[in-house]
Amino acid sequence: MRRHKWILIGLIILLGAVLYSNLGQGTLALWGKGEQKEAAAESSQSLTELLAAQAPKPGTPSPSFSLEDLDGQVYTVGGKRDKALLLNFWASWCDPCKEEASDLVALAKKYSDSIDVYAVNVTLYDQLDNVKKFVQDYGYTFPVLLDKKEEVYRKFNGVAFPTNVLIGKDGVIQEVIVGSLSAKDLEAKMKKLTNS
């Protein structure tokens, strides 16, 4: 009989711990008519909205930045430009980046009169030797900028590689594309960018 008593006490303690951890605010939240859950949902939604509000969006000016390329030359972005700009955030280990690399080279060459292409390697997540090999293997002829501390990638609220940001001559973001596109789709967006 004594053994059953201790088993029952253990089960009650275990059940109490599970209820407490699952309800977040203790067992009283179960009978609080959802008010605490609604407040938590509102605060997390507000946080999401706050983060989204700070991310650059189409129709807003591009964040300004300066980065060095592989040869130590400094490139600056921000404000009006002579040509539209495609910023390509990438990493050498990223398979979708490898898939779009050849298309990016061909399109950069085709639209070189009207669009600059800057390949921004987020070097914090990469190794410089791998970056150089990638650039050589895929024949990049456009500037390859090194975001060594991920500062620029964060300014653009980067979440995945590749991320392409299309910026008009006026310095305003036209589109943010997360993930790779087919050559045809990317070219359609570049044509649209040249007309804006």
Image (cartoon, grey):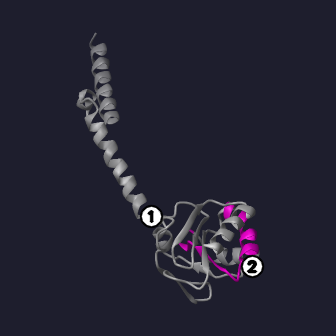
Q: In the rendering, at what x and y percent does residue 94 appear?
A: 65, 63
Decide if residue 25 is in sight here: no
Q: In the rendering, at what x and y percent does residue 55 appear?
A: 45, 64
Secondary element at image label 1: loop
Q: Residue at x 73, y 63 (%)?
A: 99
Decide if residue 16 is in sight here: yes
Image label count: 2
Q: Residue at x 69, y 70 (%)?
A: 191
Q: Which residue is mark 2?
A: 109
Q: In the rendering, at what x and y percent does residue 63 appear?
A: 46, 75
> Going from the N terminus, do you reach mark 1 or mark 2 first?
1
Q: Residue at x 62, y 84 (%)?
A: 70
Q: Which of these two is toward me, 118 or 5? A: 118
Q: CA distance from mark 1 to mark 2?
A: 30 Å
Looking at the picture, does residue 196 appear above or below residue 143? above
Looking at the picture, does residue 196 appear above or below residue 179? below
Q: Is residue 114 magenta?
A: yes
38 sits to left or right of 144: left
Q: Which residue is mark 1?
A: 55
Secondary element at image label 2: helix
- Part of the protein shown in magenta: 96-125
Amino acid found under the numbered disc labelled 2: Lys
Q: Main secondary structure of the magenta part?
A: helix
User: Residue 168 lies in what quarter of the image?
Assistant: bottom right
Q: Which of these two is toward me, 111 or 27? A: 111
> Local crowd at mark 2 within 10 Å, few (<14), some, or many (≥20)?
some
> Local crowd at mark 1 within 10 Å, few (<14), some, or many (≥20)?
some
Dividing the image into 4 quarters, which one contains the N terminus? Answer: top left
User: Residue 161 lies in what quarter of the image?
Assistant: bottom right
